[in-house]
Amino acid sequence: MDEEIKKLVFDLTCSFPELIFPLRLIEIHWEEKWDIPTVLAKTDGKKIFLSPELKKFPTSVQEGVILHEIFHILLAHIPRMKKRDPIIWNLASDAVVNKIVSEFINFYVKGMVTFRDLQEVNPTISEEDSVEIVYYKLTEKPFFLGWGRRERNQQRKILKSFDKLVPNPYLTKEDEYKAEVALENVIEGMKNRGKDPGILEEILILRRRKRRLPRKELGEILKRGMIVEDYSQELDIRRWHDWQTFGIFYPRPICSVKRPVIVVIDSSGSTSPWWKSFLEEVVAITRDKTDVYLIQIDAKIQDIKNITTVPKELKLKGGGGTDFKEFFEFEWLKKIRMTRRELRNSLIFFFTDLVAYGVPEICPKEIDRKKFYWVLINKVKIPWGKEIPWYELGREDYEDD
C-alpha cells in the first residue's frame, strides 16, 4: 500500500476505530492512468482505485472519497444493481452513501449527489429510503436533475470504465461474510459514538434475514466444532504433587486442535443448484482455520480432494444413479491419508435429498453420530445423526447460481 494511503487509513482508524476492519479488508490503490477527470475514485466491488487528481484535494476530501467507496462495497451496490439502469442506480446509491459518510466526515466535492438534489426530481424521496426505493422513485420521472445529453454521455463513459475494470464482478460467500462482519463493526462503533446507523442497520437486518436459520445453524456448528481444546496427559510438578498428596489428577488444555471438515455432495443431479451455495458457505467460515475435504458421490465416489476455495467454474461429476455404499465402506480414507480415529473426530456434512441406496440403518462405528449432519434439500426422515434443513431457504436464493 502506498505511504500516502497508509497515512489516510491510519488517520481514519484513529478517528473512527469501528472502521479498522473494513479498511484492512479492502485494498486501496492509486491509478497512474485516469481517463475520467470528473471522477475521483471508483470500485469494482472488491477494491478501490483512486485518481491521481485526488492528491490535489485536502485531506478531509481524500478521506471522504475513500469512505464513500468503502460503503459502496459494504452495501454491495454493484452486485445489487443487477439489470437496472446503471446511470439512475449510480445516482441513487451515491445519495445513500453520501448521507452515511456525512455521519463521519463533512466534505463536499463539486457534482456530489445528495438527497436534496434527488428530492427536486421526486419530493417523496426520503433520506430513510434504501437504494432500491430511491431508484424506483427516480424512474417514475422520465428526466431527472435537468441533465442533458452531454451529462448522460459522461455517465456512460464512467460506467464503461467500470466494465473495463472488471467485466463480471463475482462476490464469493467469503466476501459477503467479511462485508457483513465489517458492517456489524461499523454499526456498533457508530452507536458507541451516539450516532444513528440509520439505513446501515436496516441493510444488516435484511442480510441476516436472508441468511436465516439453516445458514446460522451451519455457522454455529462449524465455529463451535472445528477447533477443540486438546488435553495433555503429561504431569507437571504441581499436578504431580497433587496426584501424590491428594490422589487427584486433572488434565490441562495445552493447545487448540483443528478438527477436519468433510463435505459430501450427492452429485447425482438432484441437489443442483443448491449444493454450490452450501459449499461456499462452509469454505467462507472455515477458510485458513481447518482442512476441508470435498467428496462427490452418485453411484460411486467420483472425486475427493482438499479444498480452500470454491472456483466459479466448479461443477459436479456424476449424474447417474445414487448409491452411498462406497462412502460408508470408508476405503476412501486411504486417498486422503486419514485414520478411522481421525474420521470419528471429524465434522461430516452430507448434502443430499436422501433418495438413495446404501444408507446404513444404524450409525457406523467409524462415525460419531453427534458430529454427522444430513444437510437436506427436501423434508425427509433421517436414519440417524443430526439434520440441517437447507430446504427452508427456498429455491429463490439460488436463482443466480
Image (cartoon, rainbow, N blue to C red):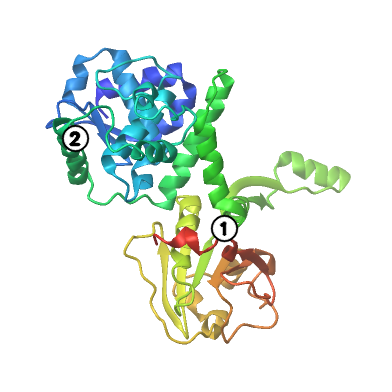
Q: Mark 2 belongs to which amino acid? A: Arg
* In the displayed structure image, the side of residue 248 where residue 383 appears, left or right: left
Tell me: residue 281, above or below residue 306: above
Residue 129 screen position, x and y as percent: 47, 33
Rendered residue at 42%/27% (across/down):
123
The residue where tag 2 is placed is 152
* In the displayed structure image, the side of residue 32 where residue 135 appears, left or right: right
Regarding mark 2 in the picture, which secondary structure is present there?
A: helix
* Frontmost residue, 395 versus 152: 152
Residue 231 screen position, x and y as percent: 67, 51
The residue where tag 1 is placed is 259
Q: Quadrant of residue 162?
A: top left
Residue 235 screen position, x and y as percent: 71, 47
Q: Which of marks 2 and 1 is nearer the N terminus?
A: 2
* Frontmost residue, 69 versus 306: 69
Instruction: Please say whether residue 23 is visible from this viewpoint.
Output: no
Tell me: residue 339, above or below residue 165: below
